[in-house]
Amino acid sequence: MDKLLQIQNNEKINRADIPHLPFETFRQQLLECAATGGKVVQFFAYEDEGVSKLLAVMRTDKLYVGGCDAPDSFASLTAESEIFHMFEREIGEQYGLKAEGHPWLKMVRYHSNYNGKKDVFDNNYSQDIPGNYPYFSVEGETVHEVAVGPVHAGIIEPGHFRFQCCGERVFHLEIQLGYQHRGVEKLLQSVPLKRMAIIAETIAGDTTIGHGLCQAQALEALAGLEVDKGAKTVRTIALELERIANHIGDLGALSLDVAFNPPSAYFGRIRGEYLNPTQILGGNRFGRGLVRAGGVTHVMGDEQKKLLRDKLAELTPEVEHVNELIFSAPSVTGRFDNTGKVSKENAEKIGLVGYAGRASGLSYDARVSFPTECYAELPANSNSKTDGDVHSRGMVRREEIMHSTSLINTLLDKMEEAKSYTPQELLQLAPHSFVVSINEGWRGEVSHCILTDAKGEILRYKVKDPSFHNWMGLALSLRDEGISDFPLCNKSFNLSYCGFDL
Amino acid sequence: MLQVIKNRLEQGHRTSKYPKEPINLYKRFRGLPKVDPKCDGALIQRCADACPQDCIDTKNCRIDLGRCVFCGLCETLSGGKFVTFSQNCEMGTASRDDLFTQGDLPALAEHSKKHFKKLFGRSLQLRQISAGGCNACEADTNVLNTPFWDLSRFGIQFVASPRHADGIHVTGPLTKNMRAATITTFEAIPHPKVVIASGACAISGGPFYGSDEIVGDLNSIIPVDLYIPGCPPHPLTTLHALLTYFK
């Protein structure tokens, strides 16, 4: 990895300083990094003055960046390391660059490519999704296939699932998405700056703060904006509230999926109780309109602080009691234990992130490895149960709820008043620059990456939601499981469709 | 068992008394905006130029609630002189035109009396379709099934099959990739049926307007009966719209 440049999270880099390697060297460097346990943060194609290029950001305990000119077709990295799997499919789809020898080269989101090259999948996009999509199939006397979706039996986003089963046992689950594709990256590269925050906040609505924060930090780095301590504290609190609300909602849903109804009713309501403080902070339950490049739109005064502190004091014991109720019931643990297991080895191989990774024993937490905002001064969390099953994913969330609560209380104690924010009507971004921003959203590593051109306009905007890594984890968790345990496994991951589909 | 009872006692009864008693939202909440058309023209222009959704009509001094995401920037920029966001959640309308407003929406109940009250007043079953929704609209619709809101006490349910439904509730900007599935689902519902567009996305494309990967306006594909603005609509906005329109 000696030929890649080591960088910091949210550091503005001159694009000229990024090592531009011959493709073969670039490929070797990435594979070398992967072989020593390195993971992909970003790996994407872009077009600069008519030339297609590749760029990768890798992480070990540090961050590295490197790039190269992209050949129209190139020897797939996935063939040697699975962590590149989705990224190479995406590169093929977005820029018509074919990873030769990729074992599963299928479309990701079903849209025509950005530069008018020949379509890698031979799709005709006037036809409806999924076009040429060779689903995995299994043959044999007692083998059958169950197809579900895109529209599911609930208030939930669309996606298509195919289970290859033998009786009730699942051989493999294939997850085909793309239905939610809204063209987010293309929009972010073309719309005026004033629209960008609104789009970032709606990449994945349950991760409004996570994505909003990534974008704000990236723009701050490129525009040279400083953020005051008080605003950083508000942002950190908002990100932790988002984490708590989502974890609580999912623990309730997990309980419902094993037919233990009381905790699901309690946590259904309590989840809302954690959205309301975000509304107290910024006027919206999901945190819309709170985080902006340069700070936060609403300062936290004594009144808001007191409301938040009182609410947490009221809710925390209730949450602990309901959690105790869930995790001490034998009928629950009987269903959670050993269900939907993803081994540490497999988790490493596909590069799981977030609580799903931590539940399989990968300790990576971006708040600890690449701290932003107030995280450098806050204590890390540790997890007691890391067996990779539904129980572990539930426990990690339970522990994170308590950890996040204590982080918020700590921050409230030493909170400085945030300066009032002036809306940035004119934001001037540095030309010829690059920045990558990473935050630990509630699902895991959220990352935005921006490249600017000679005029300081956005040349490429790349978004990565943790779900981009983790959907494969859900597929693996279903191997050799009963098909009726799908809802349980699914909820234990609770991945984002729109965050993946963009 | 003892723990189940202990928790039950601790949780008590939490269902809101709405609509008999109002639910008060915190003062920072941004609900129905109120526009002052007598405000200085230059200030109006500044707000319109800065509006990320381009939803301020300077000529008629109106805001398009179908596209507004309630970010509050116009209120901040004008110091409340041009726009102030109230804590009023009641924003559902029966016509797209009514959403271009200065803050005075027509009463929804009037319209309903002529149409759906008789059919669906006692029982309304809806099929939800997320067509590119970011999961905020979906989450805040789902929340209506939690004990605090307890939607089913009003005879309104979200059902699993379009065959069991009286209508669809659509969220998201109707992505190209969900177009066919949305139409198929709609067609699978027996007549008579209603169509609800929920959230800025379904009404106008919302934050994604202008993208060539979306249809952007549900009404251009399927005629919409009820519009529920917001990004996402507050659960109370949805509940109010459903109750006044159908009950």
Image: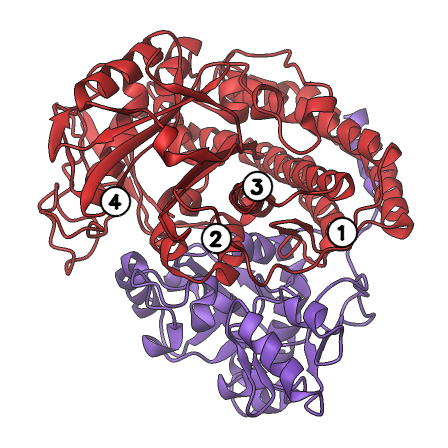
**Tag on residue A48?**
4
Disc 2 sits on a residue from what chain?
B
Respond whether the residues carrying marks 4 and 3 are from the same subunit: yes
Residue drawn at 20 percent across, 40 percent down: A52
Q: Secondary structure at mark 3?
A: helix
Q: CA distance from mark 1 to mark 3?
A: 20 Å
Q: CA distance from mark 2 to mark 1?
A: 22 Å
Q: Residues within 10 Å of mark 4 (few under 14, many from 20)?
A: few
Q: CA distance from mark 1 to mark 4?
A: 41 Å
Quarter the N terminus of chain A occupies: top left
Q: Secondary structure at mark 1?
A: helix
Instruction: Give the foreground label among 1 and 4.
Output: 4
Q: CA distance from mark 4 to mark 3?
A: 24 Å
Residue B166 in sight: no
Mark 1 residue type: Leu
Respond whether the residues carrying marks 1 and 4 are from the same subunit: yes
Residue A391 placement: quadrant? top right
Q: Residues within 10 Å of mark 2 (few under 14, many from 20)?
A: many
| Above or below for A348 versus A163 | above
Which one is earlier in the sequence, the residue at label 1 or at label 3?
Answer: 3
Q: Which residue is at the front of the view, A218 or A91?
A: A218
Instruction: Give the foreground label among 2 and 4.
Output: 4
Instruction: Give the foreground label among 2 and 1.
Output: 1
Mark 4 residue type: Asp
Instruction: Give the foreground label among 2 and 3.
Output: 3
Disc 1 sits on a residue from what chain?
A
Which residue is the site of mark 3?
A217
Which residue is the site of mark 2?
B134
Mark 3 residue type: Gln
Which residue is the site of mark 1?
A281
